[in-house]
Image: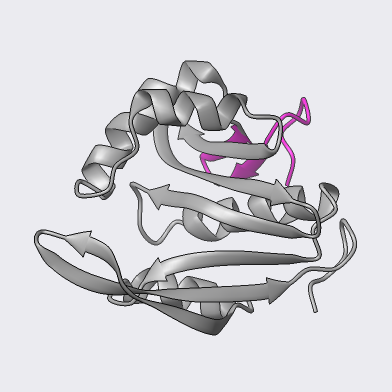
């Protein structure tokens, strides 16, 4: 559901809206909370948000960041670079993913790729429920507190903007 001014998507008491450079610092704090071993810096996030082939979104409730996500557009493929939520059970992650998929379609992507830590069962369940299928594995890709964890590469076919996915 769009907000009254069409700038975002409403989700209960929170909304989704495109991320701006003003959001970078709060996203960086969330990165440190959610991904302390692999958090992006303020500078990396600012470059991403400002890049013409990237699309970033934030979920906010009364000025508080609940989550964020971003994709890279590369021709007929979009790559989910990041998705993080500070809230569970509110549908924030699913809404962020759906926003990214719609932006990918609008950008001409026919499929979306992502990587997820093998031990992140919550995220894997969200992606599987959204139609993503495992297509590969990157052994030891993540290094978390001194141990190596595989990355699962997942993919979903997208169809035309505004339509259902295949």
* Side of 27 relative to 36 (left or right): right
- In which image quadrant can residue 9 be found? top right
Name the one closer to the observer, 88 or 40.
40
- In which image quadrant can residue 133 be found? bottom right
Q: Is residue 139 magenta?
A: no
Residue positioned 52% across, 18% down in the render: 21
On the question of residue 151 being in view, the answer is yes
Q: Quick one: quadrant of the C terminus?
A: bottom right
In the rendered view, tell whether residue 2 sits above or below residue 18: below
- x, y percent for residue 98: 65, 57
- In which image quadrant can residue 120 be found? bottom left
* Side of 118 relative to 161 (left or right): left
In the rendered view, tell whether residue 62 sits above or below residue 8: above
Name the one closer to the observer, 165 or 52.
52
- x, y percent for residue 87: 35, 50
Q: Is residue 4 magenta?
A: yes
Name the one closer to the observer, 78 or 91.
78
Instruction: Give the mark count.
Output: 0
In the rendered view, tell whether residue 112 sits above or below residue 7: below
In the rendered view, tell whether residue 149 sits above or below residue 53: below
Residue positioned 40% across, 50% down in the render: 84
- x, y percent for residue 135: 56, 83
Residue positioned 33% across, 46% down in the render: 86
- x, y percent for residue 113: 61, 66
On the question of residue 62 being in view, the answer is no
* Side of 151 relative to 47 (left or right): left
Q: Which residues are magenta?
A: 1-17
Residue positioned 35% across, 58% down in the render: 88
């Amino acid at each position: 559901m769009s907000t009254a001014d069409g700038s975002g998507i409403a989700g209960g008491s929170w909304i989704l809206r495109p991320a701006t450079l003003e959001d970078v610092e709060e996203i960086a704090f969330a990165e440190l909370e959610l991904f302390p071993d692999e958090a992006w810096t303020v500078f990396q996030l600012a470059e991403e948000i400002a890049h013409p082939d990237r699309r970033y979104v934030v979920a906010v409730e009364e000025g508080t960041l609940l989550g964020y996500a971003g994709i890279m557009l590369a021709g007929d493929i979009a790559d989910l670079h990041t998705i993080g939520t500070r809230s569970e059970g509110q549908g924030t992650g699913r809404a962020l993913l759906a926003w990214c998929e719609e932006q990918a379609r609008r950008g001409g992507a026919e499929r979306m790729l992502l990587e997820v830590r093998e031990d992140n069962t919550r995220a894997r369940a969200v992606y599987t429920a959204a139609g993503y299928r495992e297509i590969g594995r990157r052994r030891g890709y993540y290094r978390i507190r001194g141990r190596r964890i595989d990355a699962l590469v997942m993919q979903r076919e997208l169809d035309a903007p505004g339509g259902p996915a295949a």
